[in-house]
């Protein structure tokens, strides 16, 4: 359901023309920071995949992919939701070694997405994936990687503010790590989103860990597909967005499933039917490398660093009439 929040007295610090230059600066700078800090190289990636391959990201399991038939092959293709699974196969096919990784500009359509200040049916992110081994398949390496990404975000903000001094965004470089169960224990009467808001309001920058499994309450903090992240070794990078007054996710990431965790999670999620898909067979037979990876939202990052109130100020998409009317009334210029 569309719900647009207009911060009191909000006005962008940049003209539409300046905004375009600032978006370019954010994307170019962060891409360089990310690739250097995680030892990644840029690769080409698909906009769509074969619907029977099992390579599409199933997100929470209920989102409908955009599909189309191909005249020449007489098969059906799906626009990707993300490249979470494709990247792992690519690392294997391209011969990446332990400690090396890839990133790509990923564009997707999520037609069942809500429309509000931070959600759009158009998704743009840096999808990245890196080969690890048994020695680095642990929580400490995950935390080290999270800190490197947060540093890349903060370094990019410094570059933006150097060119556009009227940007007053402030971010905390120190990351607080907390599990979803710890959040539930701290705030038992709040919803999962309210817990994130409360925690981020105090800690400013956090990595919310272990998303996907059922908590002690019998509920999930949030949904995660059972076949890419290990639910015990994943999480979301969040900053407190002072303008909007709530926790602001810029990345979902984690160490990926191995054969054991995939086996367990498929059963928990009632997705045992996926075991016969080619991608899942490769994982269960230990035919793919151990990896970690994630996505960093490009428009989300631009919103945060440029202190924009609506994602439509930094990306071109389609909006409902309610959103367009609210933004026009508030003087918010949707691209």
Image (cartoon, rainbow, N blue to C red):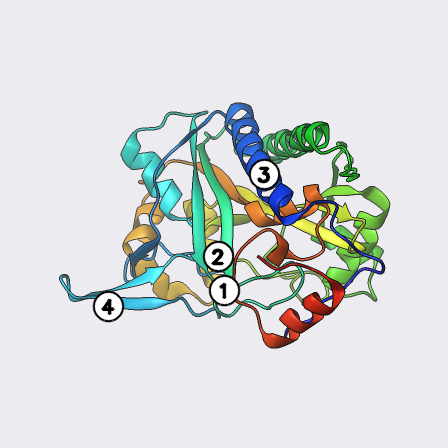
Disc 2 packing (10 Å; few <14; some 14–19; many ≥20): many
Of the image marks 4 and 1, the number of the one nearer the N terminus? 4
Can you give x and y, in whole percent of width and height, for residue 314 in the image? 60, 51
Q: Which is more toward the observer, 152 or 243?
A: 243
Instruction: Report the residue marked by disc 1.
Output: 269
Position of 139 compared to 125: left or right? right
Rendered position, 233 above or below 118: above
Q: Position of residue 312 (x, y in %)?
A: 60, 58
Quadrant in which the N terminus appears: bottom right
Instruction: Give the residue number, with chain letter if any, for mark 4.
Output: 69
Which mark, residue 173?
A: none
**Cα distance in 3D space between marks 2 and 1:** 7 Å
Residue designated by label 2: 226
Q: Are marks 2 and 3 in contact (CB under 8 Å)?
A: no
Marks 2 and 3 sit apart, C-alpha to C-alpha, by 39 Å
Q: Is 181 on the left-hand or right-hand side of 118?
A: right
Where is residue 52 drawn, in percent x and y?
27, 62
SS at mark 2?
loop
Q: Looking at the image, how many numbered discs can be counted on the residues?
A: 4
Identify residue for label 3.
Answer: 21
Q: In this rendering, is residue 193 above or below 237?
A: below
Question: Which residue appears at 65% of the width and 70% of the height?
Answer: 323
Q: Are marks 4 and 2 in contact (CB under 8 Å)?
A: no
Q: Residue at x 32, y 51 (%)?
A: 279
**Tag nearer the camera, 4 or 2:** 4
Nearest to the observer: residue 274 or residue 15: 15
């Amino acid at each position: 359901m569309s719900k647009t929040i207009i911060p009191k007295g909000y006005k962008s610090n940049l003209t539409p023309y300046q905004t375009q230059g600032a978006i370019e600066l954010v994307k170019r700078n962060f891409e360089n920071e990310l690739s250097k800090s995680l030892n990644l190289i840029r690769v080409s990636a698909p906009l769509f995949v074969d619907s029977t391959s099992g390579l599409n990201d199933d997100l929470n399991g209920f989102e409908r992919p955009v599909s189309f038939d191909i005249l020449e092959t007489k098969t059906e293709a799906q626009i990707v939701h993300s490249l979470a699974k494709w990247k792992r196969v690519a690392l294997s096919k391209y011969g990446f070694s332990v400690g090396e990784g890839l990133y790509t500009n990923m564009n997707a359509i999520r037609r069942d997405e809500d429309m509000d200040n931070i959600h759009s049916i158009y998704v743009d992110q840096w999808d990245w994936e890196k080969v690890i081994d048994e020695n680095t398949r642990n929580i400490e390496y995950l935390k080290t990687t999270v800190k490197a990404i947060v540093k890349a975000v903060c370094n990019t903000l410094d570059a933006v503010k150097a060119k556009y001094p009227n940007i007053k965004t402030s971010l905390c470089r120190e990351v607080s790590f907390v599990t979803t169960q710890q959040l539930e224990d701290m705030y038992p009467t709040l919803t999962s989103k309210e817990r994130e808001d409360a925690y981020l309001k105090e800690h400013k920058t956090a990595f919310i860990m272990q998303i996907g499994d059922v908590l002690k309450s019998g509920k999930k903090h949030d949904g995660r597909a059972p076949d890419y992240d290990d639910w015990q070794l994943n999480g979301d990078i969040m900053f407190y967005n002072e303008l909007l007054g709530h926790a602001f996710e810029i990345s979902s990431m984690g160490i990926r499933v191995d054969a054991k965790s995939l086996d367990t999670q498929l059963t928990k999620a009632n997705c045992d039917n996926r075991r016969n898909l080619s991608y899942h067979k490769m994982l269960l037979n230990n035919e793919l490398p151990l990896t970690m990876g994630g996505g960093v939202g490009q428009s989300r990052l631009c919103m945060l660093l440029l202190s924009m109130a609506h994602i439509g100020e930094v990306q071109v998409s389609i909006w409902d009439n309610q959103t367009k009317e609210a933004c026009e009334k508030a003087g918010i210029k949707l691209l």
